[in-house]
Image (spheres, grey):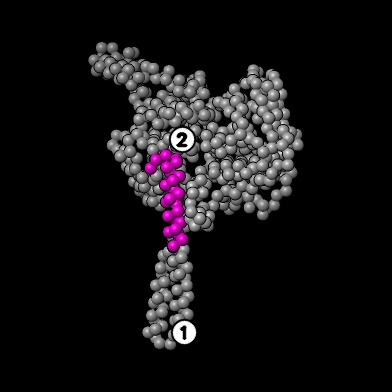
Amino acid sequence: MIADIVVREKSFGDKLLMSDVRFSISDREKVGVVGRNGVGKSTLFAMLAGTDTDYTGEIIYRKGMTVVATQQEHHGLANETVLGYVLSGLPEYAQLSHIIETYPLTMGDDMKKIAEYSTALERFEQKGFYHIEEQIERELEKFQLAGFGGHKMASLSGGQKRLIEIVKIMHAQAQLALIDEPTNHMDYVAKDQFIAWMKSAPEAMLVITHDRDVLANVDRIVELKDGTSVSYRGNYDAYLKQNALKTSTGIHDHEMLERRRANLSDKITQFRRLKEKARDPDTIKQFKRREQQAAAELADLATIEKPTFWIDKKSVEQLDYKAADNYQRYKARNIRMSISSEESRSKHVLVRAVGLSLGYDTALFSGVTIDLREGEAVELRGRNGAGKSTLIKKLLGRSEDIKIFAGEVSLDPQVRVGIYEQEVDDAYFELTLHEAIERIYLDRNLSISETRIRQLMSDYLFTEADSQTPVARLSGGQKARLQIIDMLSNEPQLLILDEPTNHLDLPSIEELETALERYSGAILYVSHDNYFREAIGGTVVAVG
């Protein structure tokens, strides 16, 4: 083992976040970390990285082990170049470079410095540092960041910084890498590159992800829920099977607990009545004692909270009738998407493109043809930067700078469109969640009441406390759920989805897929999630 993790208690104010998280990590083991939004995955990583020490427990690493983690913030690094930032994470690089660059100017006949200089040259070559800048540039190119080595960190987008973090981890030569949501901004080629590296890399990894393509290639999955951790051997498919079995057993145990509670409650009432009817003092004492014993046991059982139960849809279909019925009674709350599932009355064309070539100063792509009708789906497939988002912007009339070099593109002017974008509109950032939902509806001239706002917050798992939280301070998962509220506000006939599974947890992704499968309108989407693409299907249109 290279690490043993025991977190007995971690709280935020009055909220107990973790109460018994325990697992170990072995050499070279690749571990996926999953859990509902808000259970504390990123907090756990902060504890493992040593940036959060406010908890009870022990995190023990093997002596001399190096641990690296992707950073979420880059304060004070605005003027650092990308290449300099990646190189700063290489063990020994800065020290050896300093000796090689400065000693020739100062060592003269100093034999000690000459020996240190000679050793540094030999070590620099052993570590492969003479070609490291070329290697880093090649890695950047794989992630579509060719030529970015000299760019300042301040000039990068959030998604680009996330990719830079992966490149830095790849060259850090650590024994354990902590990687948070690595593939959210990767296209399918970059993601394949990441997965190939993850599988072959010598370091052990803990990867927070709900990307099922990544989870399909890990050795183990650790799920955080109800303040504890559950470890599942194997990849995503193995996790689903084990989770279904474990959850079914847990539901049975919970049902027995509920029956015991009901039985004790009945006994308390029964003993109380018998005590009141009795006339003999010893008999009264006997019933009183039994009533108190039952009440004490009931009080103990009352402290046991209902566990979180979730089983994936395919596994539920394989349960027997009784187990499936019990699951429906006790399953955890999930988002509830109100989406039209009525059969379309017509199949007229909503989106049409013929031999389309468009871009800005030069064409980004050519020869794109789309014929999207009600009840159908079209996937736009291409690498990041190929022009998929540009095509969508042109379709929606969002940019006058986009030029059509050949062909034509049109959108039915009467169609109601719902759009899921990767980022929440900046106009909502300073508003509270409550105000943002209200503004979404009013900006579309749609009626919205206080009751409806509360219902929407409940449907999408927001609490009363969340209602007064500024949108800018919502988590990635919460912002994603707000995006879905926005997308469905006008009961759209056409959905345009740009990487909709980013930031959603596994149950929410499944609910989204289930809702889209019964959706009667048209879907135009971009996704690098192979599981999502398989679920939605449709015609694939290559862009770029």
Left or right of 513? Residue 315 is left
User: Residue reaching furthest left?
Assistant: 111
User: Which is in the foreground here, disc 1 or disc 2?
Assistant: 2
> Residue 543: x percent and y percent?
60, 25
> Residue 26: x percent and y percent?
33, 38
Q: Residues within 10 Å of mark 2 (few under 14, many from 20)?
A: many
Residue 81 visible in the picture: no
Q: Tell me which numbered mark, 1 or 2, is placed earlier along the sequence.
A: 2
Which of the pair 510/128 is nearer the observer?
Answer: 510
> Residue 346: x percent and y percent?
73, 39
* Quarter of the figure with residue 427: top right
Confirm whether the magenta stretch covers residue 52: no
**Gap in angstroms between the C-alphas marked 1 and 2:** 67 Å
> Residue 357: x percent and y percent?
66, 21
Which of the pair 247/115 is nearer the observer?
Answer: 247
Q: Quadrant of the C terminus?
A: top right
Confirm whether the magenta stretch covers residue 250: yes
* Quarter of the figure with residue 278: bottom left
* Highlighted range, magenta: 233-257
* Quarter of the figure with residue 97: top left
Q: Secondary structure at mark 1?
A: helix
Residue matched to label 1: 277
Q: Which mark is residue 214?
A: 2
Which of the pair 46/527 is nearer the observer?
Answer: 527
Residue at image point 36% right, 47% down:
22
Q: Secondary structure at mark 2?
A: helix
Residue at image point 72% right, 29% down:
410
- Residue type highlighted by circle 2: Val
Q: Main secondary structure of the magenta part?
A: helix
User: Residue reaching furthest right?
Assistant: 414
- Residue type highlighted by circle 1: Lys
